[in-house]
Image (spheres, rainbow, N blue to C red):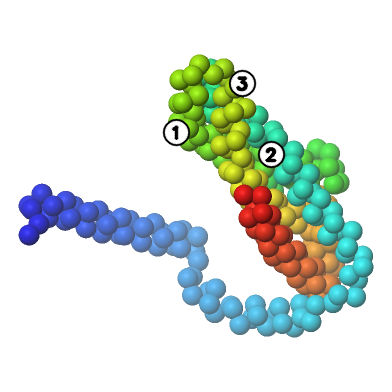
Amino acid sequence: MDSPATIALSQQKSIKRRITGVLLFAVVAYSFIYLKVNPLTPFVTLPSVFSFFGENFFPPNFTGFSSYVSLIIETLLFAVVGTYISAILSFVFGLLMAESINPFAPVRIIIRFIVSFIRNIPVLVWASLLVYIFGIGNMVGLLALIIATFGFLTRSYTEEMNNIADSKLEALKATGASPAQLLVHGIIPAFFPSWINWTFFSFEINIRASAILGMVGAGGIGIMIQTNIRLFKYKEAMALILILVILVLLTEFVVNKLRKWIL
């Protein structure tokens, strides 16, 4: 039989779950009421949504496929260059931000603040700001991609480096290894698998992000999707959307194969 303490603890957990459930329900209900949204509306409008897409977007029109090739390549290269530059910058800043590697607390705090500020601004906001500052162009999309990916990767790299430094470098430190030796012989070899995984993961995300950035005038396949929709060329837009989906799926397949081959 369970002890009285175990029974009391189980009852406390049950009460906490019930309170949490009630609070969540209250928050959701209040959100619908405040926004004046009928929860049944999305389900009622679904038939008309499917009807609109069926009548206007299908069958997709691939007659202009030859003109899309350059945009597909552009979208891929955006992701390649953006991920490459971000991975290098993030590695350096990750070293400076890792508590177990960089002993200078003021430097870590300043870098953490900068990275957090960058990371918490959505990529579309960055793109919109850069378009407003520099005008429409490929460089705007690339800069927005680099900035957004930098924030994400720096945080990810830092956490992995802290785990490595905490668990795998004690032996090297005990032998009196210098910080440079710890980096070359300890951190980098142990960090390499995580670096590959996080970088490839960011590359997959950047393929999608490149298309989204194009919708705010930052180049790539997204700008053509947006243009066709604005011109009511829905079938051409649907063709581009399907091409983008295939591109993302192929990218995921190739990246997974590369990850297994490298690691």
Tell me how far mark 1 sits from mark 3, CA to CA: 18 Å
Q: Earlier in the sequence, mark 1 or mark 3?
A: 1
Q: From the viewer's perspective, is residue 261 above or below residue 237?
A: above
Give the residue drawn at x 52%, y 37%. Answer: 159
| Crowding near the residue tagged with mark 2, few <14, some 14–19, many ≥20 C-alpha atoms within 10 Å | many
| Crowding near the residue tagged with mark 1, few <14, some 14–19, many ≥20 C-alpha atoms within 10 Å | few
| Crowding near the residue tagged with mark 3, few <14, some 14–19, many ≥20 C-alpha atoms within 10 Å | few
What amino acid is labelled 1 in the image? Ser
What amino acid is labelled 3 in the image? Ala
- Label 2 belongs to which residue? 87
- Tell me where residue 121 appears, x and y as whole percent: 63, 41
Give the residue drawn at x 70%, y 39%. Answer: 86
Q: Which mark is residue 149?
A: none
Give the residue drawn at x 74%, y 41%. Answer: 84
- Quadrant where the N terminus sits is bottom left
Q: Nearer the viewer, residue 65 or 43?
A: 65
Tell me how far mark 1 sits from mark 2, CA to CA: 24 Å
Give the number of the mark in front: 3 or 2: 3
Q: Earlier in the sequence, mark 3 or mark 2?
A: 2
What amino acid is labelled 2 in the image? Ala
Q: Earlier in the sequence, mark 1 or mark 2?
A: 2
Q: Are marks 3 and 2 in contact (CB under 8 Å)?
A: no
The local secondary structure at tag 3 comes to helix
Tell me how far mark 3 sits from mark 2, CA to CA: 20 Å
Q: Nearer the viewer, residue 33 or 206?
A: 206
The local secondary structure at tag 1 comes to helix
- Label 3 belongs to which residue? 180
Residue 69, picture quadrant = bottom right
Q: Are marks 1 and 2 in contact (CB under 8 Å)?
A: no
Residue 248, picture quadrant = bottom right
Give the residue drawn at x 22%, y 54%. Answer: 13
- Label 1 belongs to which residue? 167
